[in-house]
Amino acid sequence: MRSADGDEGFPGNLDVTVVFTITGNKFSMEYYATTDAPTVVNLTHHVYFNLDDDHSQTIYKHVLCMPSADKFLVVENGGIPVKGEPCDVQGTVFDFTSPKALGDVLSQKDEQLTECKGVDHTFLLPGKDNDMRQLGSLYCASSGRLVIISTTQPGAQVYTGNYLPKENNAVAIETQHYPNSPNRPDFPSTLLRPGEKYYSKTEYEFTVEQA
């Protein structure tokens, strides 16, 4: 796919290829991009999960665990990380370093939850650039379905479906670079230059574990 020079205000002709692969119980997405002028690239997806047998149910009983995600980005102005250092998750409602039911989180009173009407925040994943590492897992006890997520990206946006037609009916876990990075020189750069090749990969492994 080509995003032409000036498309949505971005400079350069950006050529993007996305490869979807299914191997056994694993589904992966690989992103490739090149440009003929310096431009900003932060490609992700918006896959929703509801692992219940009955998809009319909320994700309140879904259990999210991200053992290495020890920091998250504080947001304002409708969900933008405008300022401030990444915040330690320890002692906050955003601590998913051990398994936590999403309903238990969404029922808490917290300024950041109020700001986004739920969770809509980026969690930071330590590790070397472009190294594949495990982000975490999402589990539904009623169905036994478990999704294990791995990625080369340095972060993941967790969105609890706060504005879906049926609120909290699904959760999106969007692997990506930090949002607002062009305006945050303290964040890892998302600038792609001519001659460089953008690449990222995210993998979902599906299995069943009976409680």
Image (cartoon, helix red, strand yellow):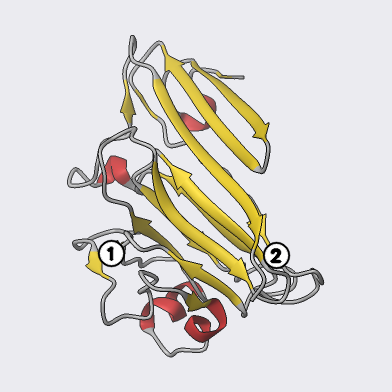
Q: Nearer the viewer, residue 144 or 57?
A: 144
For residue 56, which quarter of the picture?
A: bottom right
**Is there any visible trace of residue 39 in the rendered image?**
yes
Specify few, some or many for label 1: CA neighbours under 10 Å numbering under 14, 14-19, or 20 or more.
Answer: some
| Residue 124 location (% of width, % of height) | 32, 55
Q: Residue at x 52, y 32 (%)?
A: 8
Of marks 1 and 2, which one's residue comes earlier in the chain?
2
Helix, strand or loop status at disc 2: loop
Does residue 138 lie above or below 101 as drawn?
A: above
- In this image, 117 relative to 131: left or right? right
Asked if the residue under mark 2 is in contact with the one under mark 1, i.e. CB atoms within 8 Å, the reply is no
- In this image, 126 relative to 26: left or right? left
Residue ID for mark 1: 70
Label 1 is placed on what type of residue? Asp
Does residue 85 lie above or below 204 as drawn?
A: below
Does residue 95 lie above or below 188 as drawn?
A: below
Q: Residue at x 67, y 43 (%)?
A: 25
- The span from disc 1 to disc 2 (Cα, nearest Å) is 25 Å
Helix, strand or loop status at disc 1: loop
Q: Which mark is residue 46?
A: none
Residue ID for mark 2: 51
